[in-house]
Image (spheres, helix red, strand yellow):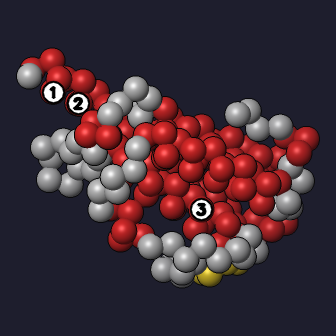
């Protein structure tokens, strides 16, 4: 979904949203055509995560930071739960992103550039500006998009070796 800048009160917020949306969409797209076992496959590296964990965790991060921290909508995120294998199907995760991206886009569309200069209290971090929140979310989503693409590549390589 391309971001319609005219729907946003702030071109800066629209730019951040394009980047965040693109990164999460890359993660969700990495699930295409995979079985439940495949999206829950974990690379041998000790700190590696499954594709389902990467998707669910990244969506949770975006939801908490944007909807709760910036927009004041409680989401009651259970961060630690995101790292447990969910058993969710690729289609359930993709549907969740479809719904969540609409909700986040609508909430962000109302933010003004001046809102980015304000200070916000995150549930687990110190006070930070709206700019800092969006930079963190954008960077975090981009990192996990790379992780997801690498995990899918490792999964494909493991199939060829089997």
Q: CA distance from mark 2 to mark 1?
A: 6 Å
Q: Are marks 2 and 1 in contact (CB under 8 Å)?
A: yes
Disc 3: which residue: 63
Give the residue drawn at x 14%, y 53%: 46
> Quick one: label 3 or label 1, which is nearer the N terminus?
3
Q: Residue 125's x, y, as percent?
A: 50, 78
- Quarter of the image where one finds residue 18: top right
Disc 2: which residue: 154
Give the residue drawn at x 44%, y 29%: 32
Crowding around mark 1 (Cα neighbors within 10 Å: few <14, some 14 to 19, many 20+) is: few
Q: Are marks 3 and 1 in contact (CB under 8 Å)?
A: no
Give the residue drawn at x 70%, y 34%: 1
Q: Above or below — where is 11 with respect to 108?
A: above
Left or right? Give the position of 94 relative to 130. Answer: left
- Quarter of the image where one finds residue 3: top right
Disc 1: which residue: 158
SS at circle 3: helix
Q: Residue 71's x, y, as percent?
A: 74, 70
- Observer-nearest of 7 and 42: 42
Q: Is residue 96 visible?
A: yes
């Amino acid at each position: 979904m391309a971001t319609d800048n005219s729907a946003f009160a702030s071109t800066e917020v629209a730019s951040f949203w394009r980047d965040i949306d693109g990164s999460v969409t890359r993660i969700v797209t990495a699930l295409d055509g995979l079985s439940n076992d495949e999206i829950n496959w974990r690379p041998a590296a000790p700190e590696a995560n499954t594709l389902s964990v990467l998707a669910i965790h990244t969506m949770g991060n975006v939801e908490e930071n944007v909807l709760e921290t910036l927009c004041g909508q409680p989401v009651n995120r259970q961060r630690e739960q995101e790292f447990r294998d969910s058993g969710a199907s690729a289609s359930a995760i993709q549907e969740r992103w479809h719904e969540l991206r609409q909700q986040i886009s609508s909430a962000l569309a109302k933010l003004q550039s001046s809102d980015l200069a304000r200070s916000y209290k995150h549930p687990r971090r110190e006070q930070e500006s709206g700019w800092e929140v969006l930079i963190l979310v954008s960077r975090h989503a981009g990192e996990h998009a790379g992780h997801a693409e690498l995990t899918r590549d490792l999964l494909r390589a493991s199939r060829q070796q089997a």
